[in-house]
Image: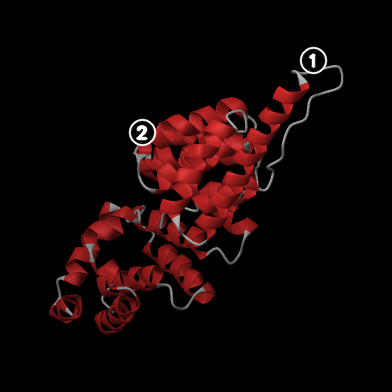
Amino acid sequence: MPNRNWLFSILAIAGSLQVALPAAGQALLPYTLQVEVQELEENGIALVQDAVQLVRFEQYDQALPRAKLATQLAPNVFQSWFVLGSLYIQQQEFDQGLEVLQRALELAPEEAGIRFTLGSAYFQTEQYELALQHLEKGLELEPNSVEALFDLGNTHLMLGQYRDAIASYQMAFAQDAEFWPAINNVGLVKYEQGDITGAVEDWETALDIDPDAAEPKLAIAVALYTQGDTEKGLAMGEAALNLDPSYGEIEFLRKNLWGEKLLEDTRTFLSTPQMQAIVSR
């Protein structure tokens, strides 16, 4: 299960918005112009804050023009570029988003949230080495970010670095014992390594945290069916797809980082008459 918690970084960074005042001894512009510039910047910051509030309510179409205008009124405030870039990424306009986020990074190279968002964007565009670079740099600045550790695990997984993937997921889970996607993805890695028993144990842990999570429920169903416990496997599979029918689609599972071995076993499982009847509904 990949993580796309870009809103977390937006809210964290937007909370630091403030107007920068001239340092002592700094040469000032003529008073009237200084006031006008400050007013423009304050208006830009207000627009950024408006955009963030709209994002909270998933009103992205209204947030985007405000964020664009904010970059014009407050071009030296990194939050305006960060929010705009994040909105572009959320709408999968990756080229524009990456360009704008790089501008934010130039203004604030030590802001971990910008690095994390760039890492997520590069992951979504399958540029895994660049994703790894930005996530690792961001974690140097903010080492306990659950979301970034999870994204790092996903990136290691896509690069075939299984040991590092498990380590990153376990660190994320250690930070938040309720964050079941991390232990769920440890199970995905173990299954590809041939450790089906270990994978099932991790998926059961995920279900203990969230009994209504369809993904670990279906994964356990496939594992049970593959190991010969067909009746229990089919029952769990039906329960999983009743929770979320999307998990009956192989391409959806692939996007959720299910590996080839697990996908192959899932194809066999979903091709049974019992599961076909459920999928067709």
Q: Position of residue 6 (x, y in %)?
A: 50, 50
Query: Which sits in the foreground, 44 or 215?
Result: 44
What element does badge 2 sit on? helix
Q: Position of residue 55 (x, y in %)?
A: 51, 55
Residue type beneath disc 1:
Ala
- As measured in the structure, the alpha-carbon distance from the residue carrying label 1 to the one carrying label 2 is 38 Å
Query: Measuring 45% from the left and 46% from the top, which residue is drawn there?
Result: 64
Image quarter of residue 252: bottom left
Q: Position of residue 115 (x, y in %)?
A: 55, 36
Query: Measuring 33% from the left and 81% from the top, which residue is drawn there?
Result: 239
| Badge 1 or badge 2: first in the primary sequence | 1
Q: Which residue is mark 2?
A: 95
Residue type beneath disc 2:
Asp
Image quarter of residue 32: top right
Q: Quarter of the image containing the C terminus? A: bottom left
**Residue placed farthest to the right in the image?**
24
Query: Which sits in the foreground, 70 or 241?
Result: 70
Q: Residues at badges 1 and 2 in contact (C-beta under 8 Å)?
A: no
Query: Measuring 58% from the left and 67% from the top, which residue is drawn there?
Result: 178
Can residue 3 be spotted in the picture?
no
Q: Is 44 rendered above or below residue 52?
A: above
Mark 1, Cα crowd under 10 Å, few <14 / some 14-19 / many 20+, is few
Q: Which mark is residue 226?
A: none
Query: Measuring 63% from the left and 49% from the top, which residue is drawn there?
Result: 12
